[in-house]
Image: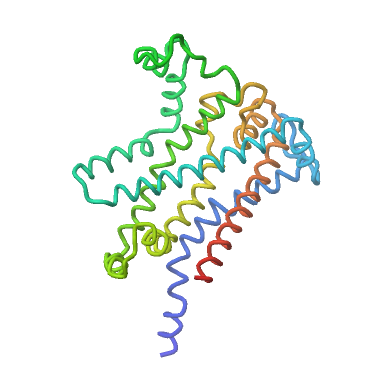
């Protein structure tokens, strides 16, 4: 009897052991290596030397371009996550309604998410070209403009285009995450609200949002991590030019490591980014849980 009890006691741990080992090998161990490198002296050839303390971190944050990179990262994450969440939620509400061609509309919505980010960024890079871009050609043919517009006349405009592309490719993920939450809501809730005389706004804020909040929370946290670490769009369209003015932290640390051969500060930046994501995700989750507890 004791042997059976002991076996049942340890059996769950045996089943999760492979997952734990995979997490240790592919997540925890690499993170530990990065932290070690961030506090080590690394030569331009990539040779790891002695303990360097906070030297790499000081070098990284004291760079003249660092404030611009951090501001770009903040604008990039807030604009892409914020607008894609709002638009994605609205799209999910629409796609959750019964209408003719709903399956086709859902399939079309998947396309920006399924395609490679490099391909999509390359296509948009071509579209906004002044000389032969499709955007200028369409506007000229429709008579909205008389001469071609240089959509890349300033780095601020280019960064806006990068944010726009980021929003477009992120909307499908939010849409289908929220849509899965909407489809799990029992129709009885809406029927009861209708009987009580609730209008659309009251149903939205008192029924839909509270019940879909778990799905929305998951999509937002994953989006923050995904968008913060997004590399292909910015690197494909501008490569951070001119002079790192359109760089975010991820593209900047890549250029720092592989173009400038300053692997120490680049590793320190990756640690800073990791800590920022941990703090931001933790704060968002705590704030969401407190709101749910107060309801």
Q: Nearer the viewer, residue 72 or 3?
A: 72
Q: Residue at the location (53% across, 50% down)?
A: 26
Name, please, the residue furthest toward the bottom: 1
Q: Is residue 71 left or right of residue 291?
A: right
Q: Residue at the location (55% across, 28% down)?
A: 235
Q: What is the count of numbered marks?
A: 0
Q: Residue at the location (70% across, 48% down)?
A: 36
Residue 99 rendering spot, x and y as whole percentages:
21, 47
Above or below, 22 against 172 in this view is below
Q: Nearer the viewer, residue 210 or 184?
A: 210
Name, please, the residue furthest toward the left: 100
Residue 244 rendering spot, x and y as whole percentages:
66, 26
Q: Residue at the location (46% across, 47% down)?
A: 85
Residue 221 rendering spot, x and y as whole percentages:
51, 52
Q: Is residue 2 left or right of residue 40?
A: left
Residue 55 rendering spot, x and y as whole percentages:
80, 41
Above or below, 50 against 142 in this view is below
Q: Is residue 160 left or right of residue 270?
A: left
Q: Is residue 93 left or right of residue 10?
A: left
Above or below, 239 against 35 in this view is above
- Quadrant for residue 2, please give it: bottom left
- Quadrant for residue 273, please give it: top right
Q: Indicate how the structure is coloured in the image.
A: rainbow
**Quadrant assignment for the N terminus:** bottom left
């Amino acid at each position: 009897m004791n042997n059976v009890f002991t076996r049942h006691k340890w059996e769950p741990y045996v089943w999760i052991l492979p997952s734990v080992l995979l997490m240790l090998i592919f997540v925890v161990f690499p993170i530990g290596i990065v932290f070690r490198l961030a506090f080590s002296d690394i030569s331009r050839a990539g040779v790891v030397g002695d303990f360097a303390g906070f030297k790499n971190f000081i070098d990284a944050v004291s760079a003249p371009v660092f404030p611009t990179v951090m501001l770009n990262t903040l604008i990039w994450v807030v604009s892409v996550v914020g607008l894609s969440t709002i638009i994605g939620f609205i799209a999910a509400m629409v796609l959750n309604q019964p209408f003719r061609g709903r399956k086709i509309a859902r399939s079309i919505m998947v396309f920006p998410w399924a395609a490679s980010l490099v391909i999509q960024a390359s296509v948009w890079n071509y579209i906004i070209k002044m000389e032969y871009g499709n955007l200028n050609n369409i506007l000229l043919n429709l008579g909205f403009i008389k001469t071609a517009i240089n959509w890349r006349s300033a780095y601020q405009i280019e960064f806006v285009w990068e944010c726009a592309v980021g929003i477009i490719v992120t909307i499908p993920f939010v849409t289908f995450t929220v849509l899965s939450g909407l489809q799990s809501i029992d129709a009885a809730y809406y029927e009861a609200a209708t009987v009580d005389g609730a209008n659309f706004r009251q149903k939205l804020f008192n029924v839909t949002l509270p019940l879909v909040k778990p799905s929305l929370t998951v999509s937002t946290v994953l989006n923050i991590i995904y968008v913060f670490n997004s590399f292909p769009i910015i690197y494909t369209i501008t490569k951070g030019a001119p002079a790192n003015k359109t760089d975010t932290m991820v593209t900047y640390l890549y250029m720092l490591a592989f173009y400038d051969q300053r692997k120490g500060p680049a590793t320190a930046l990756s640690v800073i980014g990791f800590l920022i994501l941990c703090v931001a995700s933790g704060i968002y989750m705590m704030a969401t849980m407190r709101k749910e507890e107060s309801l």
